[in-house]
Amino acid sequence: MKRGLLVIFLLLLPLLGGCAAFGMSYARLEQLRVVQTLGLDEKENGVRLTLATAADEDGGGRCLSADGTTLSAALRRAQSRSTEETLFCGHVRQLVVGERSDLAPFLRYVGRSADLRLDTPLWLLRDCSAETLLTGVGSDSRGVTEILAALESELKQRGDSRSFTAGHILQSLEQRGCALVCLLDYTRAAERGSDSPTQTAVLSGFAIVQDGQVRSHLKAEELLGVNLLRNRLGVEQLSLRDMNGSPAVLEIRQGSSRLTPRWAEDGALRGLELTVKVEAALLEGNSRAIDEDYLDDLAAKLEATISGQLRSLLRRAKLLRADYLELGPRVEAAAPLAFQRLEAPFSELLPGLEISLTVQGSIQHEYDME
């Protein structure tokens, strides 16, 4: 009987202790301040954390900043400043990192923390601190958390784009030494459903991160090429000029890439052959001039545009020695044993590889109606 009670107690123990936050195990719910967005800025002698809480019955949420020599110390100081309420970080929905901050220790902290989650989206800021963003955007009805959640939803709806979570970024850094992170600008713009510009966050592109630091930037439209090489293409629109100089809009709905590694006789990796296929539909164009020659001309322009973007991405990967295009895993999948025998990590071999690229584009006048 006693043994049975002991087993039941041990099973219930994790549930009894699961609500602990900053050592406050039994804080009353009305005394909790739920932190929804956490911002990090690196300082000369430590870090500054900015916490944006959820809206309360009086309207908007609160922002609280605290400095510390470590992340843990900054969190303790933030809690000490919230004298009447207990800060609860178990429901953080967004992570924001200011410019020139080292991502590596922050990501490790997120991975080890009992309160924070690795599946939380993480955003980098350009020319702005996390404290400035968290305290400067939003209103009583729409705070920074809602603004970032709307950006996250918009990226997911595109199909090929997405916000990168802390776990994905950490895994990519550990496996390939680099990662892509969504890059935000703090600017004045009209939010959806409003004609009045306000301070807000907008997606400006993507950062290439190496060793925890930003090494280069990609424009938002360059993710088309990244996703083609990663075989993760969704639906994209591309604007071109047709043979008459008039604007034409294509919808890229299918695309893929095939990678073939080329090996030397001694087993060394000599180069890569990349073949990319893109299928697009013509959404807008000069309807009076659409014939086979017109579509062939647009297909050639599509191939040239995609080829130029891919070559630029590949040059950047070589220059940075950064496999942010995830070519290494595809080489390993094609030849596992040969990959294991490489004389150096794949990213270090990138600058010396001969990479051939072929782009094949096709365009339909309209979708097939069945």
Image (cartoon, rainbow, N blue to C red):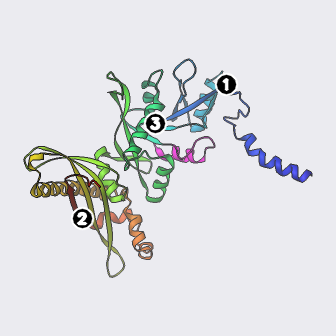
Q: Which residue is mark 2?
A: 357
Q: Amino acid at mark 2?
A: Leu
65 vs 91: above or below = above
At 67% across and 24% down in the image, what residue appears? Answer: 30
Crowdedness of circle 1 by 10 Å Cα count: few (<14), some, many (20+)?
few
Q: Which mark is residue 31?
A: 1
Q: Locate residue 323: give its quadrant.
A: bottom left
Residue 83 image position (x, y, % from top left): 65, 22
The answer to which of 96 and 283 lies nearer the viewer is: 283
Q: Is residue 149 above or below residue 189?
A: below
Label 3 SS: helix
Most extreme residue toward the left, as rendered? 244
Name, please, the residue furthest toward the front.
Answer: 370
Q: Amino acid at mark 3?
A: Ala
According to the picture, the residue beneath numbered tag 3 turns out to be 149
CA distance for labels 3 and 1: 25 Å
Amino acid type, mark 1:
Gln
Give the residue at x 32% y 50%: 235
Query: Label 2, label 3: how many angstroms apart (C-alpha)?
Result: 37 Å
